[in-house]
Amino acid sequence: MIGQDIQKAADLLKKGDLVAIPTETVYGLAANALDTAAVARIFEAKDRPSFDPLIIHTDRIEKIKPFVKSIPEKLQVLIDAFSPGPLTILLEKEATIPDLVTAGLPTVAVRIPAHPMSKKLLESLDFPLAAPSANPFGYISPTRAKHVEDQLGDKVSYILDGGNCDFGVESTIVKLTENGSVQVLRKGGLSVEALEEVAGVVEVNDVSSSNPNAPGMLKSHYAPKTPIYVGEMNSAVKKLKGKRIAFIGFNMLNFSLPVEDQFLLSMNFDLKEAASNLFAVMRQLDKSKKYEVIVTDWFPEEGLGRAINDRLRRASSSF
Ligand code: TXA
Ligand code: MG
């Protein structure tokens, strides 16, 4: 059921149920992070392999202190600058965080979402929420309550409807390396440029591995069902001759395809707006079943364009 009743969401979570929650990045599939049975239900609902760890969510970093060994100064600075917001940090965990949450890793991922509804919900709880994106494993993340209902509607007790997600790509995940520098493990809603303004030069982990412990995660991920080809349009059209093609573009139509088969992400040439529309458009194309292939070109490699390109790189890995 979809609704806006925060109290109801809190009550369900307290008794170990699953509730989908809105965040400013994507919708999350939430459960009490300290309740192993509830966390197990997340993995089951998503069909997610248990080696893929979850992010825990809270409204204040103070509430997480009992569950982690310490908060290194450099990460505290990032929390002060960017939380609440699309930032996730890795911290050494205490035994009080179930191993199921972290897939046996010594670290736990922590995030303070900025969405007013999830903020209010978290304020009313005395436990953190474990919440991966609320999609079946490997598929693109939901950015509307309806997306969650379509795919996991029968597996959650409640979907808290907070409207369209502002960012539309997942949070940026960072950790402190052994030599003390900040490393980006997954590019996301917080841009590398913004991070560097506060943290100085940061290392960026690009898609290269299929090792989920190096979480930018699996190489093939965030993928719609319709295959994606990323590259220059004219050569794509030649290569894909005879196929029914949909084009996802930034703000420019392409002359080699009918207008009705083209989907532009931001007429204002705004990368943030483009990111917030990307997953919804991919879903719409999957749902229409009209197309055999989606063609798109790389976005400018700056700001949220880097997170968009990262997702496109993963989504297109079957080509
Ligand atoms: O924006 C987001 O981050 C959303 C919203 C709901 O908060 N959540 C999200 O969760 O994208 P999920 O589970 O779909 O992606 C988080 C990724 C996992 O795939 C995992 O590989 C990585 O974060 N991760 C979590 N804990 C980790 C840890 N301790 N060490 C390394 N990677 C970790
Ligand atoms: Mg996910």
Image (tube, rainbow, N blue to C red):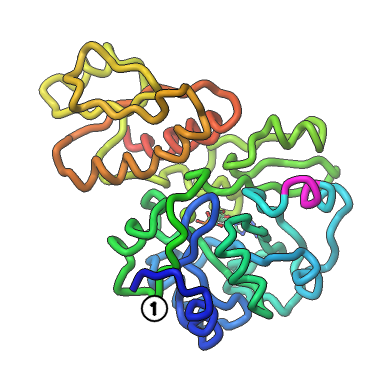
Residue 77 vertical placement versus 269 (above, below): below
* Amino acid on which disc 1 is placed: Ser
Residue 273: x %, y % from top left: 48, 34
Residue 317: x %, y % from top left: 38, 36
Q: Quadrant of ligand 1?
A: bottom right
Residue 186 vertical placement versus 212 (above, below): above
| Residue that extends furthest to the left in the rendered view of this protein | 242
Residue 84: x %, y % from top left: 69, 54
Q: Is residue 88 left or right of residue 18?
A: right
The residue that appears at 73% across and 47% down in the rendered structure is 82
Residue 203 location, quadrant: top right
The residue labelled by disc 1 is 157
Residue 227 vertical placement versus 83 (above, below): above
What residue range appears in magenta? 78-82
Q: In the image shown, does 272 or 151 lie closer to the viewer?
A: 272
Q: In the rendered picture of this protein, how many numbered marks are placed on residues? A: 1
Residue 98 vertical placement versus 180 (above, below): below
Magenta stretch containing residue 62, yes or no?
no
